[in-house]
């Protein structure tokens, strides 16, 4: 009798485990792992360190994407044992702005009759690239056996890929005509504003730094 009761108990426990597993798979029960991880955010709120006034007109923005292909080999060692190659896709934007705070005292020259004005336009400046973390990711990574073992005990970092991507995007922004686009947009904006103030003719000269 005891054996039968034991068998019946084991069978019942097995059935309960099967039912619980099925319910968990369909989402009707929470995860049953008693050692599951719990995330507790104890971060402090952001603290204001300083404030400053801006006199910048953001006239254009460029959206860029670059693929960083970095391979690290160990001389004399097959790549299957040591070394790695990473393809990192990075996306980001670059703002081009005009700093009106750099306007000189003679930055606006109004004609004696008050019908025309000449503007010394500061050269547009390219801001530091802003890498979009949500659109940047490791596309593929191949590692040798030794590097894979090291990755188990070492915390991997993608900092070098972000730095490389930032430099590549900055170089692309310089060559893409973004500064000229910002200059043209600023002229259009100032022309409309000054004409609304009554000036019939608006001209521009570049105020080179």
Image (cartoon, grey):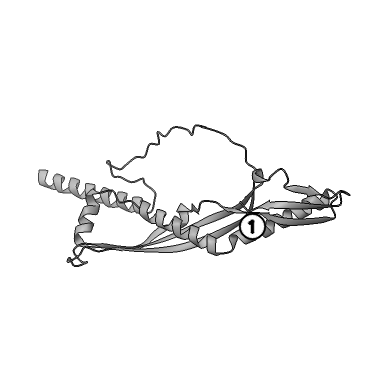
Residue nearer the viewer, 149 or 115: 115
Q: Residues within 10 Å of mark 1 (few under 14, many from 20)?
A: many
Identify residue for label 1: 182
Q: Residue furthest right?
A: 113
The foreground one among 114 and 31 is 114
Q: Position of residue 52 (x, y in %)?
A: 59, 36
Q: Residue at x 73, y 54 (%)?
A: 189
Counting the numbered discs, the total is: 1
Q: Quadrant of residue 67?
A: bottom left
Residue 158 position within the rendered picture, expressed as x and y whole percent measured from the top left: 36, 53
Residue 100 showing in the rendered view:
yes
Residue at image x 38%, y 54%? 26
Q: In the image, is 143 to the left or to the right of 3?
A: right
The x, y position of residue 183, in whole percent, is 66, 57
Residue name at image x 22 percent, y 49 percent: 153
The secondary element bearing badge 1 is classed as helix
Please state, as top left, top right, bottom left or bottom right, where the N terminus lies in the image.
top left
Q: Is residue 97 left or right of residue 109?
A: left
138 or 123: nearer the eye? 123
Task: Give the percent coordinates (x, y) of residue 159.
Answer: 37, 51
């Amino acid at each position: 009798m005891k054996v039968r009761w034991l068998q019946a108990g084991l069978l019942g426990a097995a059935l309960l485990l099967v039912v619980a597993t099925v319910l968990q798979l369909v989402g009707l029960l929470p995860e049953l792992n008693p050692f599951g991880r719990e995330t507790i955010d104890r971060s402090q709120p952001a603290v204001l360190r300083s404030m400053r006034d801006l006199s910048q007109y953001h006239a254009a923005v460029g959206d860029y994407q670059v693929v960083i292909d970095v391979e690290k080999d160990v001389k004399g060692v097959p790549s299957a044992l040591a070394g790695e190659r990473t393809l990192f896709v990075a996306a980001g934007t670059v703002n081009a702005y005009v700093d009106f705070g750099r306007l000189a005292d003679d930055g606006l020259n109004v004609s004696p009759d008050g019908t025309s004005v000449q503007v010394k336009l500061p050269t547009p400046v390219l801001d530091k690239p802003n890498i979009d973390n949500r659109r940047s990711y490791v596309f593929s990574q191949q590692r040798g056996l030794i590097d894979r073992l090291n990755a188990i005990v070492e915390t991997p970092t993608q900092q070098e890929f972000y730095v490389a991507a930032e430099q590549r995007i900055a170089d692309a922004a310089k060559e893409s005509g973004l500064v000229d686009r910002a200059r043209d947009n600023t002229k259009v904006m100032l022309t409309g504003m000054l004409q609304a103030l009554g000036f019939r003719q608006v001209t521009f000269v570049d105020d080179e730094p």
